[in-house]
Image (spheres, rainbow, N blue to C red):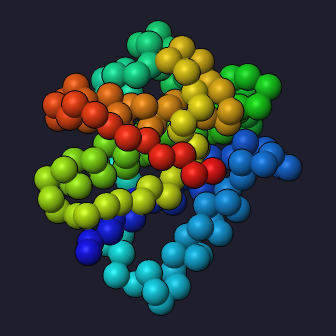
Amino acid sequence: MTTLLYSHPICIEHDPGHGHPECPDRLRSVMAGLDADEFGDLERLEAPIIDFKKIELNHQASYVAEVFENVPDEGRVYLDPDTSMSPASGEASRRAAGAVCDAIDRVIAGDADNAFCAVRPPGHHAESNRAMGFCLFNSIAVGAKYAHTTLGLERVAVIDFD
């Protein structure tokens, strides 16, 4: 069985601020656990940067533009009381969604049996036109819509285990 593991160092650099529950240490902990010997067979891949048009499969173009126009050069910009962006957030969010779509492509093509995307910022609470629940974009919905519209899958299941 081939399992793909997607991640990227920029995902750790997405920094929502000191004391925030969705912090870089969560991903560091996941990656440390996946470095154990029993996970040595994982095929480790760099999360690719997704094209803005794929993000727009689930998000309004005006919202996507607003997010990327407001990524700060330093400090933080808040999109809602719980969700902020740091300088790394733009690239990290594109790589998070990129990992999901690339994983779908490779599993559907038969290159792997399954995939795990160890990425941040998280991506399953954001709505089509706003950030929510620490998420800038809904990478999961982007992936589901990509699988449906681009690859022609009739049904897509999403399992949220957090």
Say above or below: 66 vs 24: above
Q: Above or below — where is 130 with respect to 123?
A: above
The answer to which image quadrant residue 72 occupies is top right
- Observer able to see residue 124: yes
**Residue at left offset 67%, top offset 36%:** 134
Q: Residue furthest bottom?
A: 37
76 horizontally vs 28: left or right? right
Say left or right for 121 vs 95.
Answer: right
Q: Residue 97, position in %: x, y?
A: 41, 40
Can residue 65 be seen by looking at this rendering? Answer: no
Residue that lies at the very extreme toward the right in this rendered image? 19
Q: Is residue 63 above or below residue 152?
A: above
Residue 55 pos. (x, y %): 38, 27
Quarter of image, res 25: bottom right
Query: So how many labels did they put on this image?
Result: 0
Q: Position of residue 131 (x, y in %)?
A: 62, 24
Residue that extends furthest to the top in the rendered view of this protein: 62
Considering depth in this image, is 151 or 76 the residue closer to the camera? Answer: 151
- As drawn, is 56 to the left or to the right of 29? left
Residue drawn 57% across the image and 27% down it: 126
Residue 158 position, x and y percent, is: 43, 41
The quarter of the displayed image where residue 52 is located: top left
Residue located at (26% from left, 75% from top): 1
Q: Residue at x 36, y 75 (%)?
A: 42
